[in-house]
Amino acid sequence: MIRYGQQHITQADIDAVVTALKSLNLTQGPYIAQFEQSVLAACGAKHAIAVNSATSALHIACLALDLGPGDWLWTTPNTFVASANCALYCGAQVDFVDIDPRTYNLCPHKLEEKLIIAKNLGKLPKIVVPVHLAGQPCDMAAIHALGQKYGFKIIEDASHAIGGQYKGKPIGNSQYSDITVFSFHPVKIITTAEGGMALTNNDNLAVRLGLLRSHGITRDASLMTQDMDGPWYYQQVALGYNYRMTDIQAALGVSQMTRLHEYVTRRHEIADQYNQSLAGLPITLPWQHADSYSAYHLYVIRLQLDKVKRSHLEVFEALRAKDIIINLHYIPVHTQPYYQRMGFKQGDYPEAERYYQEAISIPMHPMLTQDEQDYVVCSLREAVTS
Ligand SMILES: *Cc1c(COP(=O)(O)O)cnc(C)c1O
């Protein structure tokens, strides 16, 4: 069975986890800070807050930016539901901006058109969440410029994108955003089983994210409203959650981070090979912007349905019948029943919907062997040409 994505666990990873298990702290120990430092070293932001998932990171990122009832958060429909749900957790409302048909990322031109309308209606968003689909960064300079002009904050959902670059600098440096979020779910670039992280260059946001991660409780005297009663003392100064990552997970993360560069390099080799061997087939290959060095979390092809005899579903089934577990990223969020109940409907975001009719994520992960990749290429060729 060949899967579209898969983790890679080495003996060094296992040893790191065992060491953490045998240590005094299974949670809230030294590996958390070490993991945060290793991600900062790779990504170049000032602060990192490790949490138990990217979903949690998105939630506390919204809270740290004061999203609440009466506010709007805008994101792309072509994402995992978590990028939008984070607004609803805060009692805010969600709206979407359609995708660029080349990158499949949130389109900055459509964003500006929508901002002009929203400004006239007095309904400008407080936060925009661009998602770096498949690991290819969004047009962050354009989105950031619009943020300056229309006064919204930016959370980069970089769940797919650790190890990638934008304009030659690492994704996560948050140069064009307030907060960047990573996911360490097993299918992502590196894993902690479950896990996420929020990165920021803003000192105040870092303090707030740190509080929100753990009940709003602090042991830092400078954040307290009165003197400490004694060494046991802590204060709850905000309403936070238990979104902490364990030390066992962080130890795995530290070990995985040592191979980040290797993983992304290997993903590029696989992508280059797909680009060559799939050229000429009736499929659209993933177009890459010149500013982008993708982390290649996914390799997404689009079927040119007017030239392929089979339907999208039939191509899916043909490959799955050959034990190639392909997938589709993503079902447009606004077409989910939960979102339809809010008034969104089919037809609202035609580019994202058209993409959904044609897209397939084919196997892309560092464990993929040459033989497996050849088998995927052969099977796909047969499925789209016969
Ligand atoms: C995986 C993913 C998430 C959620 O990540 P978790 O760590 O599983 O919570 C959010 N957004 C995007 C774009 C993702 O791919």
Image: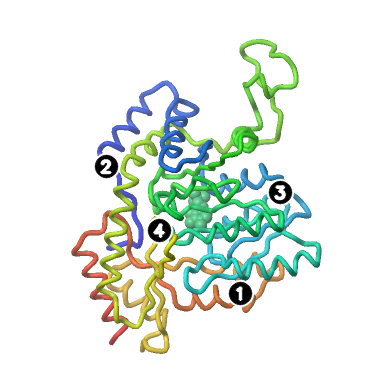
Q: Amino acid at mark 4?
A: Ser
Q: Secondary structure at mark 3?
A: loop
Q: Badge 1 is on which residue?
A: 349
Which is more N-terminal, label 4 or label 3? 3
Residue 325 in the image, given as x and y percentages of width and height: 34, 66
Does dot 2 land on a helix, a strand or a loop?
A: loop
Check disc 2 and give the amino acid type: Thr
Q: Is mark 1 within 8 Å of ligand 1?
A: no
Q: Earlier in the sequence, mark 2 or mark 4?
A: 2
Task: Give me the C-alpha separation between circle 3 and circle 4.
Answer: 30 Å
How many residues crowd around disc 2 within 10 Å: few (fewer than 14), some, or many (20 or more)?
Answer: few
Looking at the image, residue 315 lies above or below residue 115? below
Query: Is the residue marked by circle 1 packed among few (<14), some (14-19), or many (20+) residues within 10 Å?
Result: many
Where's residue 300, x and y in %? 40, 68
Q: Quadrant of the C terminus?
A: bottom left
Residue pictured at 71% horizontal, 45% vertical: 66
